[in-house]
Amino acid sequence: MSGDVGLQIAIAGRMGGPSGLLDEIAHALGALGHQVLSYPDADALHHSPASLRAIDALVAAPRFRCSREIMASAPRLRGVVSPVTGVEGIDVSAATDLGVIVANGQTPENSESLAEATILLILAALYDLHGSETVLRRNLPRPAQPTARMLRGKTIGMIGFGQIARAMTLRLSNWGVRIVASSRRVHADAPGDVTWLGIDELLRTSDVVCVLASLNAETRGMLDAARLRLLKPGAVLVNTARGAIIDEAALYEVAAERPDLRLALDTFTVEPLPPDSPLRSLPNAILTPHMVGHTQESIAAVPVTAVENMRRILAGDLPLHICNPDVIALWRSRFIATATRTE
């Protein structure tokens, strides 16, 4: 199908992190001949009913709440594009019901950067990087016994097995580790040798636990106090996915009780992490502000991928990264009907 030009695209919300990405996306879409309108938040868009009725597609920034109500009020809406990986602000189930395709920015640069960064955090925790720095910075005597531990021979547990877990598995294939994973389904095409376990067994047996799952109703608060207490002595817990998957109050309590645990957290329920968060006081925690996997390469890919996803959607082609594949048949029938009405 050939794409329409002069369609109306809404860019809603604000980006955290590097600035100017939404402006780049808007400029590129405008250069394709589309009318691009920006809205700072859901209220601004919702209070513009004429705009809602007219928009053909929506770019939803991470903090924008793209609800069923908003999508249902936009009868011409063909697709919603998240420029980043996360789509927790988008009611994907409602989009599927309404025949709206959802795409995100799960680029190879993004998943591979996060895979490398997650391995970096694993090593920093195992090798007690901060402890070694402290010895030097404070002119302390060397400890009588080393605190660092090798990665070789360890069991790495992955909660969730998407592109980041796959990239990690490939990179760790020659490190002499055992990979176990907990996922909604067994991935027969997983790279390397992966053992599939239930989440409780994974927590009991893994030396390193990596939280790599998407945030949804099923995973929110999944790692509660009872499950966190299943972690084996000396375990490392790394979260580079979404903070709300872990009950942070329970995590603080368990980590304070068990100084043998080592944490590496790049994401939190509330971001930025509040200054009074008790997590900041944990000496056994590495904390980074949801940016450890943001590389120059991954950021450069954001606007390029968002524009390509949008171009394909408006042309009636499947986007690069589909979040609701079950919608495809209904979406195609809606696209044909919508395109016919605009001719």
Image (cartoon, rainbow, N blue to C red):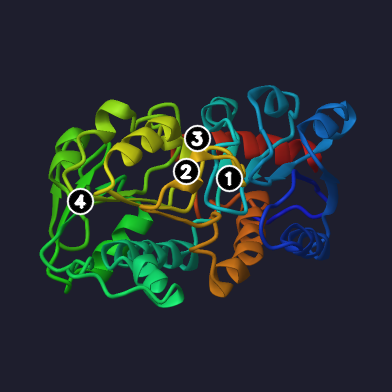
Task: Tell me the kind of residue under disc 2.
Answer: Leu
Q: Earlier in the sequence, mark 4 or mark 2?
A: 4
Residue under circle 2?
A: 279
Marks 1/2 in contact by CB < 8 Å: the verdict is: yes
Q: Earlier in the sequence, mark 1 or mark 4?
A: 4
Marks 2/3 in contact by CB < 8 Å: the verdict is: no
State the CA–CA distance, disc 3 to disc 4: 45 Å
Marks 3/4 in contact by CB < 8 Å: the verdict is: no
Q: In the figure, 54 relative to 239: above or below?
A: above
Judge from the rendering whether residue 323 lies leftward or rightward of residue 115; answer left or right: right
Quarter assignment of residue 334: top right
Q: Position of residue 28 (x, y in %)?
A: 77, 65
Residue under circle 1?
A: 273
State the CA–CA distance, disc 4 to disc 2: 18 Å
Judge from the rendering whether residue 24 lies leftward or rightward of residue 242; answer left or right: right
Image quadrant holding the C terminus, namely top right
Residue placed at 51% from the left, 57% from the top? 288
Q: Position of residue 29 (x, y in %)?
A: 77, 60
Residue placed at 54% from the left, 54% from the top? 290
Residue under circle 4?
A: 234
Residue under circle 3?
A: 327
Task: Tell me the kind of residue under disc 3.
Answer: Val
